[in-house]
């Protein structure tokens, strides 16, 4: 699938979004370009999950003459088409799967953007082969017939990544991808994500974990209470002062091999 001619995957302008009676975003503008891997970093309550729900069509901005949202260059877009072109992995999605659904069925459900699969859904040989191929690529062949409820968190996350990859989407949207994983599973999962970034997939990473931001991500957006505090090159945005302001506590950053980690400041 091709991108829009201008290379813009997502363009949100002057969006005001409510969840219930709460205004989460007031006049939010944000864009994501092809090959510009981006991390949105912020504390709980910053509005990160609302951006994901906005992309998934689960919440909608207030209608306004100044507001516009374009996805892959289209102002009028189908939620189902977006779900094919933006491979999404989130906590909400993980918690909605039934325990008895097998790893193979988790991956196959990506073809219909459904939670699990149903009797009325048919899969051709090509789709079945594609699901097997993805499980193999992710090192998850052993999860093919394993029930979701018997998997570790890391195994579940790999199956959901496979679900996001069935359409070979040009972009991946990841919500705190290593939350709940132990150190080995964290390293392995981040390595999988890096491989896809290195093979041409654009990644939007939404997190409050600084250690999740891989070296390939060069742009970082700091989000706090629905407002963008900083947006720019990672080396300029990830500073002790900026992170201390973002999280309302003293923060000291350390770097190693392109990765960042936060420690308590003084």
Image (cartoon, rainbow, N blue to C red):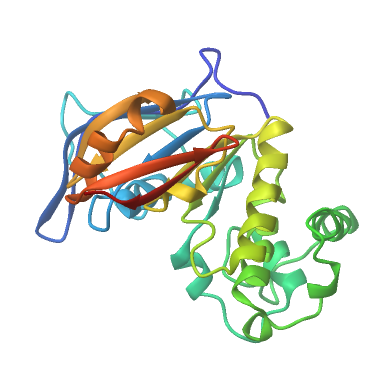
Q: Image check: 204 left or right of 52? A: right
Indicate the position of residue 62 as horizontal and vertical percent values: 17, 41
Q: Give percent across and percent down for residue 158.
A: 68, 62
For image coordinates 65% across by 24% down, the residue present is 2
* In this picture, residue 231 sits left or right of residue 160: left
**Does residue 34 appear in this view?**
yes
Query: Where on the picture, by quarter, is residue 27?
Result: top left
Whole-percent x, y for residue 214 in the image = 56, 40
Q: Is residue 30 left or right of residue 62?
A: right
The extreme left residue here reads 21
Question: Does residue 67 sit above or below 208 in this rendering?
Answer: above
Q: Eyeballing the image, is 240 above or below 167?
A: above
Label tally: 0
Quarter of the image where the N terminus is located: top right
Which residue: 86% across, 54% down? 133
Question: Residue at image x 24%, y 50%?
Answer: 46
* Residue at (38% x, 26% y) in the render: 31
Q: Nearer the viewer, residue 215 or 64?
A: 215
Q: Is residue 30 left or right of residue 74?
A: left
Q: Residue furthest front?
A: 266
Q: Position of residue 256 (x, y in %)?
A: 55, 39
């Amino acid at each position: 699938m091709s991108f829009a001619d201008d290379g813009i995957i997502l363009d949100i302008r002057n969006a005001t979004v409510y969840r219930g009676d709460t205004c989460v975003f007031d006049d939010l503008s944000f864009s994501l370009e092809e090959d510009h891997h981006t991390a949105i970093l912020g504390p709980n309550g910053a509005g990160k999950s609302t951006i994901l729900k906005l992309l998934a069509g689960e919440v909608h901005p207030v209608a306004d003459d100044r507001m516009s949202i374009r996805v892959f260059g289209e102002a009028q877009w189908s939620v189902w088409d977006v779900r094919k072109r933006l491979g999404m992995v989130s906590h909400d999605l993980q918690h909605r799967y039934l325990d008895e659904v097998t790893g193979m069925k988790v991956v196959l459900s990506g073809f219909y953007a459904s939670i699990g699969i149903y009797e009325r859904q048919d899969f051709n040989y090509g789709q079945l082969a594609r699901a097997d191929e993805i499980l193999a690529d992710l090192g998850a062949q052993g999860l093919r017939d394993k029930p979701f409820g018997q998997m570790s968190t890391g195994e579940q996350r790999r199956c959901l990544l496979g679900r996001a990859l069935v359409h070979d989407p040009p972009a991946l949207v990841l919500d705190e991808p290593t939350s709940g994983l132990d150190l080995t599973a964290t390293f392995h999962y981040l390595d999988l994500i890096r491989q896809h970034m290195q093979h041409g997939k654009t990644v939007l990473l939404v997190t409050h974990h600084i250690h999740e931001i891989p070296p390939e991500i060069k742009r970082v957006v700091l989000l706090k209470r629905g407002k963008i505090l900083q947006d720019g090159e990672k080396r300029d945005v990830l500073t002790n002062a900026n992170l201390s302001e973002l999280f309302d506590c003293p923060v000291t950053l350390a770097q190693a091999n392109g990765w960042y980690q936060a420690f308590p400041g003084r």
